[in-house]
Image (cartoon, coloured by chain):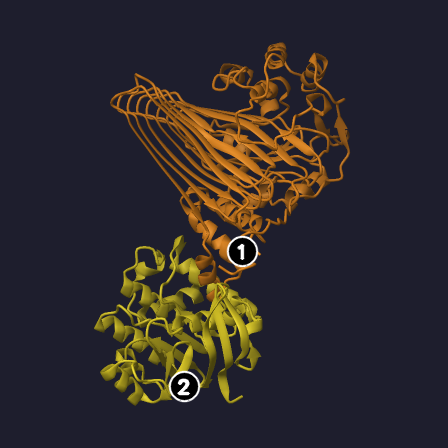
Chain colours: A yellow, B orange
Amino acid sequence: MKYLLEIHDLHAGIAGKEILHGINLCIPKGEIHAIMGPNGAGKSTLGAVLSGHPDYVVTSGSISFAGKDLLAMSPEERSWAGLFLSFQYPIEIPGVSITSFMKAAVNARRKAAGELELSPAQFLKLLKEKMSLVGMKGEFARREVNVGFSGGEKKRSEIFQMAMLDPVLSILDETDSGLDVDALKIVADGVNSLHSPQKSALVITHYRHLLDLVKPDIVHVLKGGRIVAEGGMELADRIEKYGFEGIDG
Amino acid sequence: MAEEKDILAAAVSKEYSEGFVTDIEQEFIPKGLNEDIIRLISAKKDEPAWLLDFRLDAFRKWRQMTPPAWGHLSRLPKIDFQDIIYYAAPKKDEERPKEIDPALQETFDKLGIPIREREVLAGVKSKVAVDAVFDSVSVSTTFRKTLAGMGIIFCSFSEAVREHPDLVRKYLATVVPVGDNFYAALNSAVFSDGSFCYIPKGVKCPMDLSSYFRINASGTGQFERTLIIADEGASVSYMEGCTAPMRDENQLHAAVVEIIVEKDADVRYSTVQNWYPGDAQGRGGILNLVTKRGLCRGENSHLSWTQVETGSAITWKYPSTVLMGDNSSSEFYSVALTGNFQQADTGTKMIHIGKNTRSRIVSKGISAGHSENSYRGLVRINPGAVNARNHSQCDSLLIGSECGAHTFPVIRNSSPSAIVEHEATTSRISEDQLFYCNQRGISPDDAVGLIVGGYAREVLSRLPMEFAVEAQKLLSVNLEGSIG
């Protein structure tokens, strides 16, 4: 298996409107790819389709993930198989602590893999370790999921959850937007520290700052629902200087 | 939104694991209700004349009354009171009258209710004394002797009538008068057993007390009576649970609970109501028509109600407090979950009479399937209730689009110095919340359980530990399949 993720001629949309008009994208194991593109290009749609959001409908094309037909899997099955989406707008779940939420997530995944649930002590150890990775204090574990979180806290919490679930493919949907320099560094450090030759990441962004820190192997430019250019960091440089105008393959 | 698929709108399908029937020889009295039946019940229990008179008086009052029709309960059937058996009891082994029938032992084992002290002492179960009621009789009360050493009386109602008639007579129907309402009058006429608890002056009850009610026989109703008295400076935590077999018929449960809290005393009353709710098509289920009321009689007395209502086809229940003593206080914490075709009309009344009395109401309704879930509450501040305070919070959570949530709060404030506040919210479990959980690997059923548990957390956290775990489980199980 050469590629962890293989997307072929993907057409997808929402509420009867096609947004992605034939995407082809392959990510080999161990590589970090970036997707850049202007507003409305379909970047978040791609993240939503990959993670199986029920509002999005795939009209044609195929996606293979770790050799399996991704489109035949439910959102939770995709998660169990190691796909993680860092949400652009993380959702509040009032009354549910980060600890309970993560316990449910980690153990659901272990159960799906035929493993025993973690003991409370094992879980606590994991929780503390990953919290320190993103600079979260003890009190964070007791907070209600995303309730009253600042923008930066929400994004750090997403990276923390990513670290807890240790995915093989991490999709970061504009995790960098609205972050200050320090928070951006925490996010990048998180991504880098989780990276290994067995794992891949897809970083969706408007800006190159995050890319400077995570150093993607390939940059794809998504425009009007199509991949219009592919290249290295020089593509990100060009976009930084001249914008997305004039990049159309 | 996905076009054809509203993932939040499917019927609730429940696994009711307590729906089994115990095969045991039982004695029944003929069905129907008249003075002879009442005399027969009283005779079965060898009751003193004053109690028979009490029953007959209640029966005569009941015959003049009509069932209340104000509940938002369109599925409450017209009950044929002549078609019910009012007394059913497991037959005693005549050679060993003191022994618990192995079939009963097995039943309560299966339900996880420790009816033998040694199970508790061995540390398998949490430290709790249990009065176990099976159909019309109490079959076992544990730790009676241990508690008696501290002056605490904890026994079945029938035993209390025999052994402590003065106490029973002094307090019975002082909080819920015989003619209070249609179902309370019915209960007063035909009640068969229940729990009695008296905590003497200054005694803090060292263990949780609990009553467990089990309906087993078909064609019967259960009419239990609970009377709890906390004397000056006493305190007790009381828990109540219940289950019944799955049947296509409706079965009536009309209980009365009275609580008297004297000066400086503290009572916490917790209920996890898990009567059979009926099937997915709305067939069968318990009609739970219950009157519960406490009287904070003394200064600084305190009564806290916590209820988790997940069962019953119909729930009509308003645990209430009369705040008579100055500086007395009370809380009502409620989670009511309805799925399929269940209907619940539940809430509380807080009647402020004394000065500086305080009450707090937190009601969390959860409706799924085709169910109807109503909060009905009354906060009344009498003219003498100087500086009284009430805060009410009524939240509704809707799952799917076929269910209903309603709130009927009434505030009657006759005290200018009182402060009464009411807040209400209605929300839905959003698709985004579900998807967020699913993306993290949490299945739709587990996600609903998690989200609902979070919503109800403020109430669940009030329950004794073991009860809280049980309640959380019930909420999840009862919502399984509520999204498709």
Point out which mark residue B129 bears: none
Residue on which disc 1 sits: B6
- Residue A142 % position (x, y): 35, 56
Q: Position of residue B153 (x, y in %)?
A: 51, 26
> Which corner quadrant holds the C terminus of chain B?
bottom right
Q: Nearer the viewer, mark 1 or mark 2?
A: 1
How many circles with numbers are drawn on the protein? 2
Direction from residue B375 to residue B22 in the image, left or right: right
Q: Work out whether disc 1 and disc 2 sit on a shared chain.
A: no
Which residue is pictured at 43% across the width and 70% down the height?
A45
Chain under disc 2: A
Q: Is B305 positioned to the left or the right of B3 in the image?
A: left
The alpha-carbon separation of the residues under discs 1 and 2 comes to: 38 Å
Q: Which residue in the structure is indicated by mark 2?
A: A31
Does residue B243 lie above or below A95 as drawn? above
Q: Crowdedness of circle 1 by 10 Å Cα count: few (<14), some, many (20+)?
A: some
**Which chain hosts label 1?**
B
Q: Nearer the viewer, residue B418 or A103?
A: B418
Amino acid carrying label 1: it is Asp
* Horizontal and vertical percent position of residue A35: 37, 79
Q: Is residue B418 above or below residue A116?
A: above
Quarter of image, res B192: top right
Amino acid under label 2?
Answer: Glu
Q: Nearer the viewer, residue A235 or B87?
A: A235
Q: Secondary structure at mark 1?
A: loop
